[in-house]
Amino acid sequence: MVLTTRLPAGATQGIAHIAAPLPLLWVICAVSLEALGADPVAELTAFSGEAAVVFLLLSLAARPLRRVSQWDWPLRIRRMLGLWAFAWASIHILIYVLLDLGGYWPQLADDLSKRPYIMLGALVWLLLLPLAATSTKSAMRKLGRRWKQLHRLVYLAAPLAIAHEIWQEKTGWGDAIWHAPVLAVLLVARLSVQPFWREAQGPLQKSRNR
Ligand code: HEM
């Protein structure tokens, strides 16, 4: 299926750039107005984790959307979406360290044994770190082919992030009930758009797969 409607690329990109910071604005307002309910730390932890996963999923959706629509803007905003995912993951960790742990490090060992999903979360963040660090055009140029290989780590980070999300739930799957199927669809779409085994492709194949 190919969507033929053309959206003005500049306008769509502009809207995306304006919309992406809105969740952060919402958090800042909610904190300032003390409108986060009885347990603001839990609320902030949940919101930041959710935001990280949603931005991660949106960044993964860019290529399949480009493929079915022929629009350019999904690929143009992909880097921004990935960086927001990393930013929210970092905010999520800061909330844990500063507000949950309260900087009381001896508590960490106890917490890790009671909540082992934290280690999985840390691994996800470590996987996202090099992707964020090499998201610039100059890093892309310097790394050449290796950039693509490195950035495939996102296909490991995303399922692990959702595993962390499911693991921390006391009952049921929480919002992972829709995150997991969306991720599954995106991974299948990715494999059908550009199978990993086609990596030894030539320039012609590469441009066809954009
Ligand atoms: C050192 C790294 C991390 C730590 C310490 C951490 C810690 C936590 C904690 C304490 C919770 C809440 C558990 C509860 O309510 O009892 C949580 C939930 C969650 N985390 Fe993390 N996390 C980390 C990394 C990540 C990353 C990298 C992501 C996503 C990319 C993520 C996504 C989530 C999600 C989606 C939830 C569930 C939120 C909800 O309640 O709906 N976490 N994490």
Image (spheres, grey):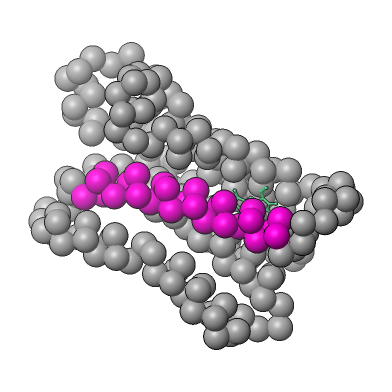
What secondary structure do most residues of the magenta stretch adopt? helix
Q: Which x, y percent locates residue 135? A: 38, 36
Between residue 49 and residue 172, name the one nearer to us.
Answer: 49
Q: Nearer the viewer, residue 79 or 180?
A: 79
Q: Is residue 35 above or below residue 65?
A: below
State ligand 1's quadrant. Answer: bottom right
**Position of residue 99 in the picture relative to residue 28 (left or right):** right
Quick one: quadrant of the C terminus?
top left
Q: Please name the residue shown 50% across and 48% down the image.
A: 86
Name the residue at 52% across, 56% down. Answer: 88
In the image, is residue 81 part of the stretch drawn in magenta?
A: yes
The vertical placement of 131 against 72, above or below, is above
Looking at the image, residue 4 sits to the left or right of residue 96; the answer is: left
Residue at 21 percent of width and 61 percent of height? 14
- Tell me if residue 157 can be seen: yes
In the displayed structure, 25 sits above or below 138; it is below
Residue that protrudes farthest toward the front in the picture? 103
Horizontal placement of 150 versus 75: left or right? right
Left or right: 210 as drawn, with respect to 158: left
- State yes or no: residue 91 in magenta: yes
Q: Can you give x and y, in whole percent of width and height, for residue 95 in the image?
A: 65, 61
Residue 16, quarter of picture: bottom left
Looking at the image, residue 136 lies above or below residue 108:
above
Q: Position of residue 75 (x, y in %)?
A: 26, 44
Question: Percent position (x, y) of residue 100?
Answer: 75, 63
In the image, which residues are magenta? 73-98
